[in-house]
């Protein structure tokens, strides 16, 4: 690693934060920003204006890693022009087996490497860099982030709250248990206190985060995820509570009952199915069959009329044949998801599936993903057109990203709605008549405010 030149003593320091990955990484970046601003750093929008660049990484897919490597190449060129620049790489990627060594070998411009479970040690690592000792800061478990770390929350009406870390499922394709460790639940009192604080600060919607939120409390012994939701549903000031991600194997009737009875618990479930073939699900080590998944969908829809269902689906898993793929398409036709995150399988180092010989050719995987996306887009459009004429409750989030002259917000079932309106509606619940259903959103007009 190269040595960063020191800034003059007392000079204002600026940081730039780059985030890849899921909502867990986004929330980790909020904590990193809070830590850095507590050290006196100020945020800037461009790496060129920064004295410190932190990349919070993901390694769930090869494409995410490649984006990190491309960005590090750009930063290396910047550092040659700006020798005092400190570059830190954190998150999941450094904790993948062999990745830290690869980062050091390929990118000597990097000064600090730390893991997803060590973000609270960033001040210590930066102090070492300032003393001229670039460092890899990967501490072995159980090095846990302590409670009460500062967070620089994004402005708006929505906030994320982590309820548990890690994953213990060991799906045969997934690297998460290896990089984030086993499941560990946060104390319920700490979660409730954090949500209460967010409500006092004006946040109106909270999304609870975990790799498998349904498993919350197993390591605590005296509370379940359903119990936690009941407690949070009583927090004053929060209009809506969501959660992600749910594992179908662990979604029991008690949790469904609590969702159905909750006042602020939204009628939306993200329920990754991954595949519709029992043979593929077994090889994935998912722990359920297609029949069990379809039965769960029926129970959710019976208890929560109008529930929004979204999912994750993978194509081209090792050994997947045309019959397996058709079973996935058939399940999608039966369930009729509102939306699906679809992706092509790619091998992740260290996972069992990466070593299996029956890898599906890339051109086959690409054809299958095109077929799946076309089917889901048609279903999403039909589902959204079925909303036309209805009046729905929307939490106004702010200006539409695609049309700054209109507002946007989501229904309780997680559908995005775009409509004309004044900025003083932001953060409020309004009733909107749906005029048109599009593939990815609804369009409407406000018929009642407040």
Image: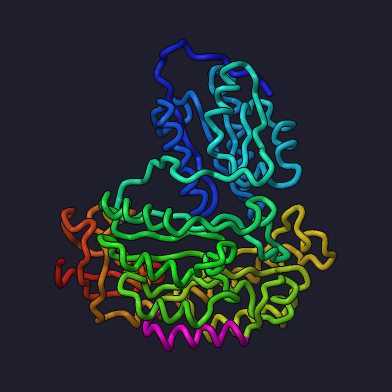
Quadrant of the image containing the C terminus: bottom left
Taking the view exactly as shown, the residue that stands out farthest to the front is: 222
Q: Quadrant of residue 411?
A: bottom left
The structure residue drawn at horizontal position 49% and vertical position 88%, both measured from the top left corner, is 298
Based on the picture, tell me whether residue 406 belongs to the magenta stretch.
no
Based on the picture, tell me whether residue 295 belongs to the magenta stretch.
yes
- Left or right of residue 338: residue 237: left
From the top left corner, tell me how far across and down residue 178 is, in percent: 69, 53
Q: Is residue 403 visible?
A: no
Taking the view exactly as shown, the residue that stands out farthest to the top is: 8
Q: Is residue 119 visible?
A: yes
The structure residue drawn at horizontal position 85% and vertical position 65%, both measured from the top left corner, is 357
Count of numbered circles on the image: 0
From the top left corner, tell me how far across and down residue 168 is, in percent: 66, 62
The structure residue drawn at horizontal position 66% and vertical position 50%, both measured from the top left corner, is 179
Q: Main secondary structure of the magenta part?
A: helix
Q: Tell me where the magenta segment starts and ends, as one range.
A: 291-307
């Amino acid at each position: 690693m190269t040595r960063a030149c020191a800034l003059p003593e007392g000079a204002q320091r600026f940081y730039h934060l780059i985030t890849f990955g899921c909502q867990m990484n986004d929330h980790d970046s909020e904590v990193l920003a809070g830590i850095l601003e507590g050290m006196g750093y100020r945020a800037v929008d461009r790496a060129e204006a920064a004295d410190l660049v932190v990349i919070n990484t993901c390694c769930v897919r090869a494409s995410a890693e490649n984006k990190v490597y491309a960005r590090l190449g750009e930063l290396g060129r910047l550092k040659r022009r700006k020798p005092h620049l400190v570059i830190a790489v954190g998150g999941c990627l450094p904790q993948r087996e062999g990745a830290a060594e690869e980062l050091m070998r390929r990118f000597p411009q990097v000064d600090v490497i730390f893991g997803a479970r060590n973000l609270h040690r960033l001040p210590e690592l930066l102090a070492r860099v300032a003393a001229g000792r670039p460092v890899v800061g990967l501490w072995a478990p159980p090095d846990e982030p302590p409670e009460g770390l500062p967070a620089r929350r994004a402005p708006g009406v929505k906030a994320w709250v982590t309820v548990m870390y890690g994953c213990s499922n060991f799906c045969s394709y997934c690297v998460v248990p290896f990089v984030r460790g086993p499941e560990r639940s946060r104390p319920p009192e700490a979660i409730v206190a954090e949500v209460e604080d967010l409500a006092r600060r004006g946040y109106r919607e909270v999304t609870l985060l975990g790799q498998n939120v349904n498993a919350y409390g197993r390591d605590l012994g005296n509370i379940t995820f359903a119990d936690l939701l009941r407690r949070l549903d009583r927090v004053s000031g929060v209009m809506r509570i969501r959660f992600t991600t749910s594992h179908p194997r662990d979604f029991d009737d008690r949790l469904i009952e609590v969702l159905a009875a909750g006042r602020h618990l939204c009628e939306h479930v993200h329920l990754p199915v991954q595949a519709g073939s029992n043979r593929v699900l077994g090889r994935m080590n998912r722990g359920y069959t297609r029949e069990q998944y379809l039965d769960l969908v029926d129970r959710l829809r019976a208890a929560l009329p109008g529930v929004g269902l979204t999912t994750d689906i993978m194509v081209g898993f090792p050994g997947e044949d045309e019959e397996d793929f058709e079973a996935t398409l058939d399940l999608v036709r039966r369930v009729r998801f509102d939306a699906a995150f679809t992706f092509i399988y790619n091998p992740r180092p260290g996972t069992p599936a990466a070593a299996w010989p029956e890898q599906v050719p890339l051109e086959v995987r690409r054809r299958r993903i095109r077929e799946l996306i076309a089917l889901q887009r048609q279903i999403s459009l039909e589902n959204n057109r079925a909303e036309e004429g209805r009046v729905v409750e929307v939490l106004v989030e702010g200006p539409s990203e695609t049309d700054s002259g209109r507002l946007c917000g989501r229904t309780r079932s997680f559908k995005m709605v775009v409509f004309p309106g004044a900025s003083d509606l932001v953060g409020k619940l309004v009733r909107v008549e749906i005029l048109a259903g599009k593939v990815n959103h609804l369009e409407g007009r406000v018929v009642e405010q407040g």
